[in-house]
Image (cartoon, coloured by chain):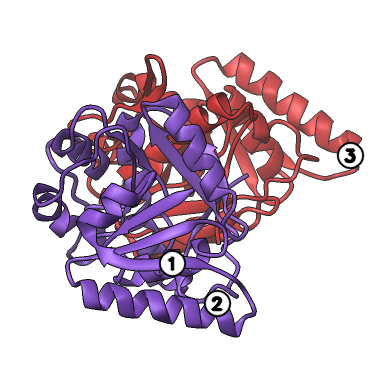
Chain colours: A red, B purple
Amino acid sequence: MKIGIVGGTGGIGEGMALRLAPYHEVIIGSRDVEKACSVSECTMAFLDEQDKVGRCIGMCNQDAVDEGDIVILAIPYRFVESTLHELTGFEDKIVISPVNPIEKSDAFYYAPPAEGSAAQLIARLLPPRAKVVTAFNNIAANRWKDPADELDYSVAVCGDDDDAKAEVMQLINTISKLCAFDAGPLRMASIVESITPLLLNLARFNQMKDVGIRFV
Amino acid sequence: MKIGIVGGTGGIGEGMALRLAPYHEVIIGSRDVEKACSVSECTMAFLDEQDKVGRCIGMCNQDAVDEGDIVILAIPYRFVESTLHELTGFEDKIVISPVNPIEKSDAFYYAPPAEGSAAQLIARLLPPRAKVVTAFNNIAANRWKDPADELDYSVAVCGDDDDAKAEVMQLINTISKLCAFDAGPLRMASIVESITPLLLNLARFNQMKDVGIRFV
């Protein structure tokens, strides 16, 4: 399967590429193609050191959309609108949103757009035939970086297209010890996204690091 | 410690009494004192069968408030306003809200009041000196019933009074394998409460039962 990562040179994007490249064909997208190529080379070199074979290439964000069967939007919430306005060709693509609209005062809090969630905003900005699915929202960015570091978390998946959701759940279950759960339609995304500021607060108020979640 | 359970004859209230009575003095409150006494007798008989000693008494809801150092509001969301209008004497009490405002269409969803969460509604209805703390929101009612059934969950605790929160966290950690986490101020309660409809949806869409949560 071909997976395009828009924002693939950010912290989470790089980590996702590292973990996906041994099993899938990964296109690391970036506004800066040189940076994408350099991250792709690092990814390949890292896998090579581990005696693993991976497939990974650096391109621009638009190429990541065009080439990917699945497109992951690994971008901060504040760049969602400007990034999506510059990109086309999302028709019939599965688009994964790990995006969380979070703000901070004395504690982190959930600050969703008028649509109800980042995922629903993304669905509004993309053509109707794009299949938006939430995933990876509640995994700390730090945890992606080291592929030797096991990700033993549950992943809640929301979306309105059942086939797209099933495909994303299958993808999730190939990564480390992640376990995908169907969390219902896309309008449930706000609950999943809002868990992230809760986890950040739990880390802060309980002297923990990179808190994640498991459904048991 | 004396723990009053308002609504102590409901499913969750009964289960809480069973699990708390071996360690604390429990006052099972109900609008129907006879029912409260009968549940209290059943609790004592059950503990006796297990060769455990417990302290448990059935009274009316107002007595549960008056006698408890900590008062648990084990009532469904739809009865919160009417129940609290009939009760007084919450000044300086620690009041635990396990209450979740949930509705259902094709999926369960979070339906909070204008205050932002059930806990904040409760704080508005009670005198300012009442110390409202959320706890137990994400544990399925079914799981309380059988004390032999281990509760191996995380419990997110929100509240604005640090001492009250610390006391509730200590109480939580005495029950089965529950593990309390400080989730910040009371205005974060909406995130904690909204996890419950997510868990109900996860159970429904993934053919699971009584799904709970662990922060890891």
Cβ–Cβ under 8 Å for marks 3 and 1: no
Q: Is residue B51 left or right of residue B204?
A: right
Across and down, in percent, residue A180 comes to 53, 58
In depth, the one of A57 and A113 nearer the eye is: A113
Q: Residue visible at 63% across and 44% down?
A: B216
Q: Is residue B5 above or below residue A127?
A: below
Residues B36 and A177: in front is B36
Callout 1: few (<14), some (14-19), or many (20+) C-alpha neighbours within 10 Å? many
Q: Identify which amino acid the numbered label 2 is placed on.
A: Leu
For the residue pair B197 and B149, the one nearer the viewer reads as: B149
- Mark 3 vs 2: CB contact within 8 A: no
Q: Is residue A67 visible?
A: no
**Chain name for mark 2:** B
Q: Residue at x 26, y 61 (%)?
A: B108
Chain bearing tag 1 is: B
Q: Secondary structure at mark 1?
A: strand
Instruction: Decide if residue A10 is on the left or right side of residue B133.
Output: right
Q: What residue is drawn where x is 55% and y is 24%?
A: A204
Residue where numbered disc 3 is placed: A50
Residue A17 falls in image quadrant: top right
In the picture, the disc for residue B176 is none
Q: Which residue is mark 2?
A: B47
Tell me the element at label 3: loop
Residue under disc 3 on the same chain as residue under disc 1: no
Residue carrying label 1: B56
Task: Give the x, y percent position of residue B132.
Answer: 31, 37
Disc 3 and disc 1: Cα gap in Å? 61 Å
